Amino acid sequence: MKFRILLWLLGRLLAGASRSNPEFREQLVDRDLVFQLQTRDGKIARHFIVSDQRIRSAAGTVAQPAFSIAFRDAAYGFATLAAANKQLAFMQGIQNKDIQIQGNPALVLWFQGLTQLLGPRQKQAA
């Protein structure tokens, strides 16, 4: 249940940033794709639609995502996405085959860059 809620929350954060964060929106220019995060068995999945510099999400899978990240199970997915060092957790998961990536790996790196922009924005020094 925690993984499902985390994916939903991620969708809300991505959608909000795509509406209000100019730096985030810059990363969405000329992107028109669908990607998904899921458990390996597909029982828990959420897809994310990138279109017109906006992101929205919905539960479930799509037939042809640009890329898909599948976690061994829900508990592992939650632990990885909630890890303090997400990049290290992802790399270890991929090496251990606890995370499977299908599709364009360059887009996975793009997505990881997007998630780094979700934190609180820093005020510009005057």
Image (cartoon, rainbow, N blue to C red):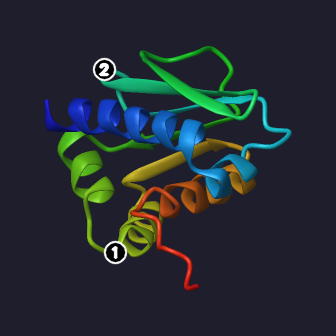
Q: Is residue 103 above or below residue 90?
A: above
Q: Is residue 94 above or below residue 20?
A: below
Q: Residue furthest left?
A: 1
Q: Quadrant of the N terminus?
A: top left
Which residue lies most toward the right here?
30
* Front-lying residue, 60 or 126: 126
Helix, strand or loop under label 1: loop
Q: Is residue 35 left or right of residue 78?
A: right
Q: Going 57% across and 50% down the picture, which residue do you hit?
A: 21
Q: Would you call the spot at circle 1 few (<14 residues within 10 Å), some (14-19), or many (20 or more)?
A: few
Q: Are marks 1 and 2 in contact (CB under 8 Å)?
A: no
Which residue corresponds to mark 2?
43
Residue 96 visible in rendering: yes
Q: Is residue 2 above or below residue 49?
A: below
Residue 72 drawn at (x, y percent): 32, 44
Q: Is residue 87 left or right of residue 7?
A: right
**Foreground of the two, 89 or 117:** 117
Q: Rounded to the nearest whole Å, what is the CA distance between mark 1 and mark 2? A: 26 Å
Residue at the spot x=68%, y=46% of the render? 25
Give coordinates of residue 33: x percent, y percent.
73, 29
In-front residue for pair 43/113: 113
Question: Which residue corresponds to the image point at 58% horizontal and 55% vertical from the top-left?
Answer: 114
Residue 38 visible = no
In the picture, the quarter occupied by the C terminus is bottom right
Residue 116: give its label: none
Question: Label 1: which residue?
Answer: 85
On screen, residue 39 above or below 124: above
Q: Amino acid at mark 1?
A: Asn
Q: Residue 8, image x and y in percent?
A: 32, 30
Image depth: mark 1 or mark 2 in front: 1
| Three-letter code for the amino acid on which mark 2 is drawn | Lys
